Amino acid sequence: MYFTLIDRVLERSDTTLVAIKHVSSAEEYLQDHFPSFPVLPGVMMLEAMTQAARSLLDPDNQAPRPWVLCQAKALKYGAFVRPGATIYITVNLHKHNDDGSIDFKGDVRLMEPGDQITNDDLTALPVACSGRITLRPTTVGITA
């Protein structure tokens, strides 16, 4: 199954990407998580950060070897994301590693329906998820 957890990229520089995702009650994975209290699964927030980091590295999806998540560290979850909410995903390139992998710092910020952002200050929004992730080029299908 392929799914996109980024609706639109709002900002992009060489080292930072900010994206947005509107969480709809029609999202298939919300049916089971949880039936009486649907919330965006934490792993989906991690996937949103991974997709944002991948988009920062390969905006046109043309890399000869796709970037994949190889490590997640210091993940923290701070708020439930319910249907109708909007999440802002921010990733910052932290460092290029000797093995070809790249480290990012990221967070997912929560905007509830009716909330307003003043002066485009995302830091005023509550953090739903934060952590460090590492991406590396895939080795699937590559022969030595």
Image: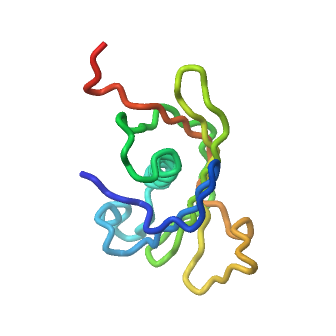
Image quarter of residue 38: bottom left
Q: Tell whether 25 sits left or right of 101.
A: left
Image quarter of residue 93: top right
Task: Residue 15: give x, y in percent of width and height.
Answer: 64, 48
Task: Residue 80: give x, y in percent of width and height.
Answer: 54, 64
Q: Is residue 48 above or below residue 135?
A: below
Q: Which residue is more in the foreground, 60 or 1?
A: 60
Task: Residue 131: give x, y in percent of width and height.
Answer: 62, 45
Total numbered circles: 0
Q: Is residue 22 above or below residue 143?
A: below
Task: Residue 45: give x, y in percent of width and height.
Answer: 49, 55
**Image quadrant occupied by the C terminus:** top left
Q: In this view, does 140 lie above or below 83?
A: above
Q: Tell whether 143 sits left or right of 129.
A: left
> Which colour assignment does the render follow?
rainbow
Q: Which residue is drawn at 42% across and 69% down?
A: 37
Q: Tell whether 103 sits left or right of 5.
A: right
Q: Which residue is drawn at 47% across and 68% down?
A: 8
Q: Residue at x 47, y 51 (%)?
A: 55
Residue sitting farthest toward the top: 144
Q: Which residue is drawn at 47% across and 54% down?
A: 48
Residue sitting farthest toward the bottom: 114
